[in-house]
Image (cartoon, rainbow, N blue to C red):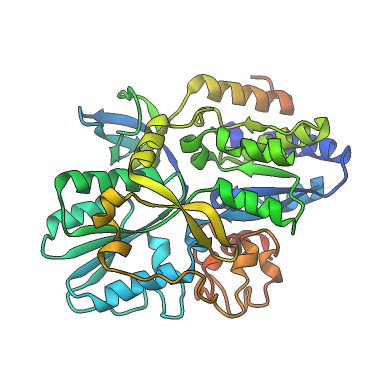
Amino acid sequence: MKEFRDKKVIQGLLKEIGKKAALLKRPIKIMEVCGTHTMTIHRYGLKKLLQKAGVEMLSGPGCPVCITPNEIHEAAIELVTSKTDFILATFGDMTRVPTKKGSIQSIVPAEGSRVQIVYSPEESLEMARNFPEKDVVFFGVGFETTIPAIAITVKDAFEEGLTNYAVLTALWIIPPPLRAIVQAKDIAVQGFLYPGHVSAIIGENPYRFIAEEFGIPGTIAGFEPGDILLAILSILEQIKEGKATVANEYARVVKAEGNLMAQAVMDEMLETKDAYWRGIGMIPKSGLKLKRKYAAFDAEVKYNLHIKAGSDELPGCLCGEVLQGKVSPPQCPLFAKTCNPDSPYGPCMVSFEGACLAYYKYTWR
Amino acid sequence: MCLGIPAKVVEVDESGIGKVDYLGTKVKANLTLLEDVKIGDWVILHAGFAISQLNEEEAQETLQLLREYTHIKS
C-alpha cells in the first residue's frame, strides 16, 4: 500500500494529470461525492496541487451527518430529554451537531436516561439485551455503506423479539442527490469521483444514468492519494475521448455488481421514501425506511414522532450550499470566525467528513 | 462515516461472527455480509461489519497501472 502514498508516484501522477488537463478547457470541475475522499484530498494537500494541474475539486453531499436535516437531530434530542429510563445510542459525530435545541452532547437527558456513543449498531442492540428495563433507540445515520449493518441489527432484534429496541432512521442513498445536483445546473460538474465504500455495496450500475442520460464521466475511487489521482486520470481520459462511463479504479474492493448479500438484506428490511436533505431539499426516493413488517422497530412509528420535514436551517450557516458544491467553505462568512472545530456552528464543521472541517484543518491557511 | 479499514480475518464461527486483526489489535467483526469468508482473508471493516473482501489480483493490477503512469519499475 505504501506505493499509493509514495512521493514519486504522486508527483508522477500529478504531472500526468497536468498533461491531460492541458489538452482540455481548464479548470476541469470534478466533484468528489464522498466525505472520506474530501478528507484524503485535503489531508494530503491534493486540493491545491490539483488546482495547479488544472483540476478543480468540488465537495459533494457525501457526509451523512451533515445532510441529515435539523428536524431529525431535534427528534433525537426530544426523545432523550423527555423519556425516562431511555438510552439514545449513536455514532460520535452525531452527538455534536448543533441544532436550535442544542446538540445531543450538550442537552440534559431525562431522569434515568443517557446518551451512549457506539462504533457499531450491534453495540446498541447489545445494550437493549443488557438493559431490558430501559428503552434503547439507535439514532442510525448512514449511506449504503452503513445501511446493511443497521438492517441486519434490526433483523436480529426482530428475530429475538426484543420490545425495548428501535432505530431512528436517517438513511440516505447516494445516486438520487447526484441526479438532483446535475439537474439543478448550478454548477457544471464535468466528472464524478464516485465513493469507494458505498460502491462496495451498490456496485457500478446505480451510477450508469449519469453517464448515459447526462453524458458525465465518473470513476469509483479508493481512499489512498494514489487511488484518487488514478481515478481523476481516468475521468480526464473519459472527457478527452468524449466517452462517459462508470469506471472502477477500486476494483480490489468494489465488484461490478457490488455486495449482493448486503443488497438482499437492504431489500428485505427497507423501502425507499422521498426524503429531505439539508440544503438540497426534498429528493424523490432518496431515503430508506423500515418496511411495515418491522414498524415496531421504527422509532418514528413507535414513539409517534411527527417529524416535520423542511425545518429552518441555522441562520447564516451555508452548510447546505457547501454540500452541493455551490460554495467553498472559506466563502462562508462564519467560517473560522464564529464557526470552528472547537465550537462548530454548523454540521459541516462537526463531522470528520465535513468539507468545512477538512478545509479548516488542512487547506485553509 | 464511510471510513473502512482493511483488516485480516483471524477467527470466524459458523454463524459468521468472528474477529479481525487491524494493526495488531483484534476486534470483533460481523462477517455475515460476505460469502465464503476464511481465516487469512483481508476484508474492509465498517461499523463492525465486513463489507467487502479484498481481491489481491485486482490490487496488483492497480499497482501495475500506478507504476506505468509513474514509470517506476516493479
The quarter of the rendered structure image containing the C terminus of chain A is bottom right
Question: Can you say whether B16 is above or below A18 in the image?
Answer: above
Q: Position of residue A78 (x, y in %)?
A: 33, 75
The structure residue drawn at horizontal position 29% and vertical position 80%, both measured from the top left corner, is A108
Residue, far front: A292
Question: Can you say whether A316 is above or below A88 in the image?
Answer: below
Question: Can you say whether A183 is above or below A73 in the image?
Answer: above
Residue A227 occupies quadrant: top right
Q: Position of residue A140 (x, y in %)?
A: 36, 56
Can residue B23 be seen at all in this image of the molecule? no
Q: How many labels were placed on the picture?
A: 0
Q: Position of residue A222 (x, y in %)?
A: 56, 38
The structure residue drawn at horizontal position 46% and vertical position 37%, both measured from the top left corner, is A201
Give the left or right position of residue B37, taking residue A316 as reference.
left
Q: Position of residue A100 (x, y in %)?
A: 46, 80
Give the left or right position of residue A333, taking residue A221 as reference.
right
The quarter of the rendered structure image containing the N terminus of chain A is top right
Give the left or right position of residue A221, taking residue A77 as reference.
right
Decide which of A17, A220 is in the foreground and name it.
Answer: A220
The structure residue drawn at horizontal position 52% and vertical position 73%, both measured from the top left corner, is A344
Residue, far left: A133
Decide which of A100, A59 is in the foreground and name it.
Answer: A100
Decide which of A93, A183 is in the foreground and name it.
Answer: A183
Can residue A350 be seen at all in this image of the molecule? yes
Residue A14 occupies quadrant: top right
